[in-house]
Amino acid sequence: MNLSLTAGRHEPFTRCELLALLLLGLSSLVLVIIAWYGDEALIRLLTSEAGPIEWISARTWFVIAAIVLWRGPRGGTALALAGLCVMFGLRELDLHKVVADTSFLKRGFYRDAAIAPGDKWLGGVLAAGMVGLVLWGLVLGARAFWRRRLHRTGWGRIVLGAAVVLVLSKLLDRIPNTLVVDYGIALETHVKALVSLHEEWLECYVPLVLAAAAWQRPPA
């Protein structure tokens, strides 16, 4: 790592950061146009769990895992981060619905009387394993990130920005249902489409920019 960075200086704004911001801004503009003027079939395709955005998103997480193992930190941290990426990819492929065709990551799964006790036990074991692997990756990754002050680097700032966007995508995922269930507010068709398009796209945008950040990271 550059000595000036370890001494406390921040790396200047990078081209990769600029491209990440441009991609986010321009793609958001495109989604607004699609939500208001796009064909309904196109919107359904782009927001479908089996659509192209979901397909790209899941497989990009596996690409990141490979880059981390190839160019990332050595030892347990690399394995933890790669495992974290694999878990995100498998979730995009609906691993969390392999038991009883519903998500074993939700509390309702264990309260549903229609689901067999054996399935609930299996779902609980799988959920515990997934959560444990994710926490392992987050803890080791965050500790290494903070210890080396990687927020001073361009690729490190992309990682932080991607984390914020990922949280935003999860909030967008819950907004329509929360408004209807808790407040009795149904979103207008175009607004609902805009929220759904952004939710799906941001879940794809995050691994794409993280893959770029992982590639930008100097080899260990």
Image (spheres, grey):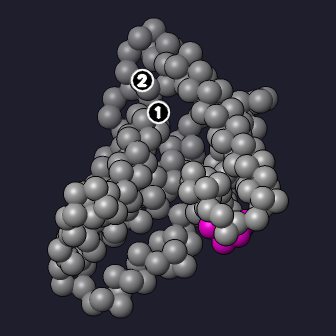
> In the picture, residue 201 is in which quadrant?
bottom left
Which residue is located at x 56 percent, y 26 percent? 142
Residue closest to the far front:
113
The residue lying toward the viewer, choosing from 45 and 9, is 45
Considering only vertical position in the picture, is 105 above or below 143?
A: below
Mark 2 secondary-structure assignment: helix
Considering only vertical position in the picture, is 133 above or below 94?
A: above
The residue lying toward the viewer, choosing from 68 and 123, is 123
Image disc number at residue 156: 1
Range covered by the magenta-colored residues? 98-102
Asked if residue 95 lies left or right of residue 171, the reply is right
Total marks in image: 2
Asked if residue 46 lies left or right of residue 143, the reply is left
Identified by mark 2, the residue type is Arg
For disc 2, the marked residue is 152
Horizontal and vertical percent position of residue 119:
77, 61
Which residue is located at x 60 percent, y 33 percent? 138
Asked if residue 195 lies left or right of residue 115, the reply is left
